[in-house]
Amino acid sequence: MTHTEKPVVLRVAAPVPLRRPFDYLAPEGQSQGSLRPGMRLRVPFGKREITAILLEVVEEASVDAEQLRPALSTLDAEPLLGPSMIALCSWSSDYYQHPIGEVFSAAIPKALREGRGLSETHWRLTTQGKGLPEGALSRARSQAKALSLLQRGEQMSELLKDEGVSSAVLRELATKGLIERCREPASIPSAALEQEGPPLGAEQAQAVEAVEWDGFSSHLLQGVTGSGKTEVYLQLIAACLERGQQALVLIPEIGLTPQTVERFEARFQAPVAVLHSGLSDAQRFAAWQAAQAGTAGIVMGTRSAIFTPLARPGLIVVDEEHDGSYKQQDGFRYSARDVAVKRAQLESCPVILGSATPSLESLENARRERYAHHFLRGRQGGGELPMLETVDLRGLHLNAGISDYLMAAIRDTIENQKRQALLFLNRRGFAPTLQCHSCGWVAGCDHCDARLTVHLRKRCLRCHHCAAQRALPAQCPDCGGTSLLTHGLGTEQTEDFLRSVLRCPVHRVDSDAMRGTEAMQSLLEVAHGKEPCVILGTQMLTKGHHFPAVQLVGVIDADALLYSADFRGEERMAQLVVQVAGRAGRESAGGKVLIQTHYPDDPLFGALRGGHFESITSSLLEKRRSSGLPPYGQLMLLRSDARNEADGEAFLRAVQKEAKPYLPSDCQLIGPLPSAMPRRAGRFRWQLWCLAASRRSAIVAARLLVDRAETLKKPRELSWFIDVDPSDVL
Ligand code: ADP
Ligand code: ZN
Ligand code: ZN
């Protein structure tokens, strides 16, 4: 190097909680031409050595040249992430104002972040191994296990080890000539179908044909449960594989069941790589590598799968796009649905958002023709949509929340029709309040501004907002009175009542009863067994699952949903009613939905009775427009959380004062306001709202707020974060 030539500067994302990239010099002796964005570098960081991702090679450093240290080495010969993934991570970091190194952690599995290499060794069955009869070697358990894993296809040695198959076992099988080592195939996955799909209906065919394959386009596919959305996805995926490209399919957390995966696997010969939070590190690594190398034709997963690199991306599908699980609620608070649309733009491929009840955001995008809007209006197989009826609760006698009218409908369903009834109640536990009849004392949480919920099964009081739990008292702690009353309703109570009056099984589905995947599996067995029974549950019931034998759906307390403090309360209520209604009568004519409420005249119910989800959403959109709330304005919340009530407010007030003069003119700051539940888990929570009229100003405002918050002095224990496009404002 001559002294007129300036050394290049490597700008990297380091896995540290700081909102900026870091600059290094190239490793000594490394030719600059071999350094490409998306490669990993080992770099010195303080006194440590860490693995960072090369973002770009620049000419000017952002710090004094003397301060630059050389990177130690490069870890990859080829970039792990291509330009579109680097752009996606950088965009996400800026848009959600989250440290860039942590954003990259979402895109790269742990083993690689720790500096390990891509896995080179794979194992596969030899012809002899493939010819083994079912259950061969069943006496040598770990050998049998290895064979059954390899019957599904080639496997990374790391994954086999993770499943408890040792190298010794692999060597032994290799000696027997049953398995052999191989490099992972670089070949493009087969586009051949395992199974033909049914011929499409006219509306389905229209949606499929509307998708253009050259470049970015976004589509909203709206159709009730059973209208054939999944079939549209499957046909689009077939077309995508046909083009030699890969499809990325996002599914809500609760919808990603073995049944869902099986439906996709049954259709295609191409392997499906599945990514979700329940995987071991090795399983995740294997699925990631298959996606990144391009050997997996279909990559399917929950929220975080949106950051999986693909060698040849061709299609992105977001099923149940309105689902709350797409928004991460802590740390890196992104919306996988919105990131999916951005990603499709960067990858120049189509993106399909599907739902029976699209979010107001997506509907507005469709109205503005940013998304093409496709409808599937009927149900496949001609199953009718259930009739929706409100039950006016005013003055009616209730048993565990159930009116005689609803009870008669349940009995008719079980006893006469021999079908299943699905009852929805969004409160778990026995009762939400315990009160002393003598002095009026109410059991409250010591750490939150909340009442404790009575759980009779476990004989305890529990706070549903923090981890607090204590034994159910026999006496009032204030006056010693022994007459303690429960008020309000929870799933346990309604379950007890139904058990006492019905002779059929009653299944409770809530997060207390449904711990683990086994419980969910047995629920699906109940649903498909079609024996007459009652299924009673919370929110968990509304998503993704099909209950073919359900004839009656009852919403026990619609009012609790309608009067929420969150501005999205009515939207969620309407989505929920339409979603639960979609579970009724798939295969049986005359399904019925009964909604119990004290406000049957609310226009929302009027529209639901008429079966017009559209008229509800257009009136909700009108309300949002007049208040400037999303989707008409962009919302972000700066939240503080502190032991001392005054500290949190003072901090946000200071941020507001500092930021206000520099705010774009179409932005406004509101607050600081206490959260709907000001104290939670012993800490006081405040929020500063920022509403921006455009996305561009929103990004400027978010940067400004974060910048001021970072530079202001604050008590050490006070913490704060920004939530861009929050899904929950309580
Ligand atoms: P959704 O995803 O909207 O709930 P599905 O795609 O699962 O709907 O379709 C519901 C049922 O109808 C499935 O059993 C599916 O196999 C079947 N189906 C979908 N499209 C067709 C079609 N064009 N012809 C026949 N059956 C279909
Ligand atoms: Zn008392
Ligand atoms: Zn609490």
Image (spheres, rainbow, N blue to C red):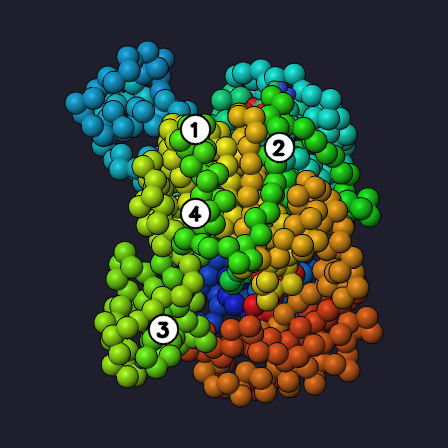
State yes or no: discs 4 and 1 in contact (Cβ < 8 Å): no
Few, some or many residues within 10 Å of mark 3 (<14, 14–19, 20+): some
The quadrant holding residue 709 is bottom right
Q: Which residue is mark 2?
A: 385
- The residue that disc 4 covers is 537
Determine the CA span between mark 4 and mark 3: 25 Å
Q: Which residue lies under the disc numbered 3? A: 435
Closer to the observer: label 1 or label 3? 1
Question: In which quarter of the view is residue 518 placed?
Answer: top left
What type is the residue that disc 1 sits on?
Answer: Asn
The x, y position of residue 367, in whole percent, is: 80, 46
The amino acid type of the residue labelled 2 equals Leu
Mark 4 or 3, closer to the camera: 3
The secondary element bearing badge 4 is classed as strand
**What label does residue 76 carry, if any?**
none
Q: Amino acid at mark 3?
A: Gln
Neighbourhood count class around disc 1 (C-alpha, 10 Å): few under 14, some 14–19, many 20 upward:
few
Instruction: Using the numbered discs, state the Cα–Cα distance from disc 4 to disc 1 in whole angstroms.
Output: 23 Å
The alpha-carbon separation of the residues under discs 1 and 2 comes to 21 Å
Decide: marks 3, 2 in contact (CB < 8 A)? no
Residue 416, numbered circle? 1
Q: Secondary structure at mark 2?
A: loop
Q: Amino acid type of disc 4?
A: Gly
Quadrant of the snapshot with the C terminus: bottom right
